[in-house]
């Protein structure tokens, strides 16, 4: 039975949109239909998710003039300009008009590339996010960041483009492989670290329930994560200031993903190792103590996440890859560190010597 357990809104004036969190939302015809303005739909999924959930979404769409279903290969390595062209080729061939709606059914790769395609097609058409992984549900589906990767850097080509709605069906997490589920927990923990210390403590207490995928615990963790992100996005939609705190661990993490080859490390795994480095650097600056670093390391281990970067990446490799990160502004690398648990800050004065010392100690 369909059950909306939480509804929150990303407050962006006329572009405000809802985030629904609940059970069996994929089968809710009325919920999906209310956010589709026209009679044309482009449903984008991948080879893993489409066999599990595409039929439910098609049924919920009912009878429409035109439904184009595009099934992409599964993997971060396919989040590329080449795959983007596959979407455009199909949409153009089927003659979709400006009132079409793109629907992203899948994880972060599907959501990012579908959103970017929607931002570009006829200079912008509506789209809806239906995230099916924990990482996408708590992070990439909310906030309007869309992009594809480039061999020289992750998410370097993209646009800020908000969806009409986000439908989070927690039932989809029951089919998620354990490794991908743990990777999603890395982004959940991030929200506690950057702005919500009580939530961080809650996660310590409820990790066993989350790993068991208990419905109530999942709904609570997803709602609190999305609420934290929505608040930041509403205050700084295009990352001109405080939204950058959402990138805790990501500069290190993106370097890991690029250096290892897209798909070798899952995004959440790379972010976990990156956050570990960020906390260690914060401790080196005297902002948090070593006990808090050890506490975080233990939490990551409980969640089956890595606590160290790959052994084949040295300081020189990190520094070279981080120089291509989006967060380099006028030659200065911005990093997100912690002044305290639950209090992130943006710094642009980290020296190469500091980074070399940090990375050499791994």
Image (spheres, rainbow, N blue to C red):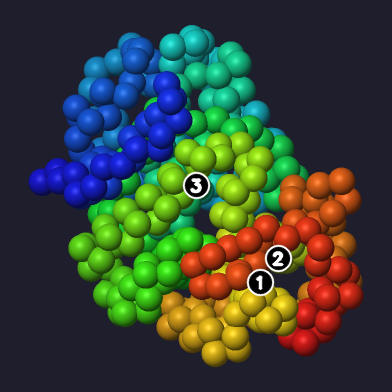
The residue that label 3 is drawn on is 232
Q: Nearer the viewer, mark 1 or mark 2?
A: 1
Q: Nearer the viewer, mark 2 or mark 3?
A: 3
For residue 274, above or below residue 19: below
- Which residue appears at 31% of the width and 42% of the height? 8
The secondary element bearing badge 3 is classed as helix
Disc on res. 65: none
Q: Earlier in the sequence, mark 3 or mark 1?
A: 3
The secondary element bearing badge 2 is classed as helix
- Which residue appears at 20% of the width and 63% of the height? 216
For residue 14, above or below residue 213: above
For residue 358, above or below residue 151: below
The residue that label 1 is drawn on is 278
Task: Please state which of residues 198 and 302 is positioned toward the viewer in this rendering.
Answer: 198
Q: CA distance from mark 2 to mark 3?
A: 21 Å
Tag 1 near tag 2, CB within 8 Å: yes
The residue that label 2 is drawn on is 252
Q: CA distance from mark 3 to mark 1?
A: 20 Å
Q: Earlier in the sequence, mark 1 or mark 2?
A: 2
Structural crowding at the residue carrying mark 1, measured as other residues with C-alpha within 10 Å and reported as few (<14), some (14–19) or many (≥20):
many
Structural crowding at the residue carrying mark 3, measured as other residues with C-alpha within 10 Å and reported as few (<14), some (14–19) or many (≥20):
many
- Which residue appears at 19% of the width and 27% of the height? 30
Q: Residue furthest left?
A: 1
The secondary element bearing badge 1 is classed as helix
- Residue 346 location, quadrant: bottom right
């Amino acid at each position: 039975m369909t059950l909306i357990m939480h509804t929150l809104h990303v407050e962006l004036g006329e572009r405000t949109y809802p985030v629904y969190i609940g059970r069996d939302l994929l089968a809710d015809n009325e919920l999906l239909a209310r956010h589709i303005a026209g009679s044309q739909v482009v449903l984008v999924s991948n080879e893993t998710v489409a066999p599990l959930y595409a039929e439910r979404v098609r049924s919920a769409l009912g009878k429409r003039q035109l439904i184009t279903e595009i099934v992409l290969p599964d993997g971060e390595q396919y989040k590329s300009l080449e795959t983007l062209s596959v979407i455009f080729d199909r949409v153009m061939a089927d003659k979709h008009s400006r009132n079409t709606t793109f629907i992203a059914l899948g994880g972060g790769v599907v959501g990012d590339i579908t959103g970017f395609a929607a931002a570009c097609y006829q200079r912008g058409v509506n789209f809806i996010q239906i995230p099916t992984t924990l990482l996408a549900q708590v992070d990439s589906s909310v906030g309007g960041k869309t992009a594809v990767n480039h061999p020289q850097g992750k998410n370097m080509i993209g646009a800020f483009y908000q969806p009409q709605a986000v439908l989070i069906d927690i039932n989809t997490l029951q089919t998620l492989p354990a490794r991908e589920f743990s990777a999603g927990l890395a982004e959940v923990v991030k929200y506690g670290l950057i702005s919500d210390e009580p939530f961080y403590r809650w996660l310590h207490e409820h990790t066993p329930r989350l790993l068991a995928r208990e419905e109530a615990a999942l709904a609570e963790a997803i709602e609190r994560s999305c609420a934290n992100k929505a608040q930041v996005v509403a205050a700084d939609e295009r990352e001109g200031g405080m939204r950058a705190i959402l990138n805790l661990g990501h500069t290190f993490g993106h370097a890991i993903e690029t250096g290892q080859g897209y798909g070798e490390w899952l995004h959440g795994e790379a972010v976990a190792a990156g956050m570990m480095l960020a906390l260690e650097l914060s401790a080196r600056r005297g902002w948090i103590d070593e006990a808090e670093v050890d506490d975080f390391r233990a939490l990551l281990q409980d969640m089956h996440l890595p606590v160290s970067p790959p052994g084949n990446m040295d300081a020189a490799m990190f520094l070279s890859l981080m120089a291509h990160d989006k967060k380099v502004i006028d030659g200065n690398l911005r990093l997100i560190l912690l002044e305290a648990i639950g209090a992130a800050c943006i710094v642009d004065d980290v020296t190469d010597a500091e980074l070399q010392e940090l990375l050499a100690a791994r």
